[in-house]
């Protein structure tokens, strides 16, 4: 487990999943899937613009919290779509834990180069997302039959969303270290502050 990475994601599993939420997820996925693409491509560009206007430290201090809020909502949306939680993201999703220990000295160049540097991680995440789509179908059938699905499938989905979480924080220039190539599937302890 990449416990020393400065980005933490975990989610509280519901006791049971509501059957109507399965169908709602399908509708929400097609409507909001565009948000995911914008976030992945737009975050480095937005970070570069703000870094050029304010410098790296002011960017992390002033804009970092705002970007963390956006990422928190996007990650909560991922958790909902990947069937990790049954709650559509609200202003303060209490069942999703997302924490970032910002750091480093991002520059305009480093922010833009993240689009290129992250291609290997994004490729692996893309492959994992295809597997996660198949797992989602299996989980959806299990939820429709018994209002729950197996722990192993749940853990895999959590691992994929954790990978995406780390990649998004890296893309936003909130952290300097490259996201680990690790499918951490278990519960994640809170980072030491």
Image (cartoon, rainbow, N blue to C red):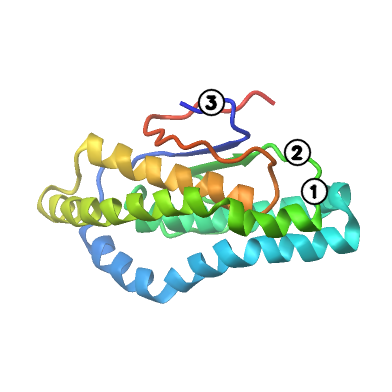
**Tags 1 and 3 touching, CB below 8 Å:** no
Q: Residue at x 60, y 57 (%)?
A: 116
Residue 32, position as x, y percentages in the image: 44, 71
Crowding at mark 3 (Cα within 10 Å: few <14, some 14-19, many 20+): few
92 sits to left or right of 57: left
Circle 3 sits on which residue?
A: 3
Badge number at residue 60: 1
Residue 161, position as x, y percentages in the image: 43, 47
Nearest the camera: 29 or 87? 29
Say whether residue 136 is visible. yes
Nearest the camera: 79 or 107? 107
Residue at the extreme bottom: 31
* Mark 3 element type: loop
* Mark 2 element type: loop
168 sits to left or right of 138: right
Circle 2 sits on which residue?
A: 103
Q: Residue at x 81, y 43 (%)?
A: 105
């Amino acid at each position: 487990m990449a416990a020393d990475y400065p980005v933490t994601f975990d989610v509280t599993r519901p006791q049971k999943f509501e059957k109507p939420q399965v169908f709602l997820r399908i509708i929400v996925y097609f409507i909001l899937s565009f948000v995911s693409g914008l976030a992945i491509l737009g975050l480095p560009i937005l970070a570069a613009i703000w870094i050029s206007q304010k410098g790296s430290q002011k960017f992390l201090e002033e804009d970092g919290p705002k970007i963390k809020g956006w990422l928190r909502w996007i990650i909560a949306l991922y958790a909902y779509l990947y069937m990790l939680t049954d709650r559509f993201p609200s202003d303060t999703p209490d069942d999703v834990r997302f924490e970032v220990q910002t750091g480093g000295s991002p520059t305009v160049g480093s922010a833009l180069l993240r689009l290129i540097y992250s291609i290997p991680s994004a490729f692996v995440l893309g492959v994992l997302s295809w597997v996660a789509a198949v797992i989602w179908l299996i989980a959806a059938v299990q939820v429709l039959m018994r209002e729950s699905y197996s722990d192993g499938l749940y853990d895999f989905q959590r691992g994929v969303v954790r990978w995406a979480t780390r990649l998004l924080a890296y893309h936003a220039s909130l952290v300097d270290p490259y996201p680990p190539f690790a499918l951490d599937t278990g519960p994640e302890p809170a980072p030491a502050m």
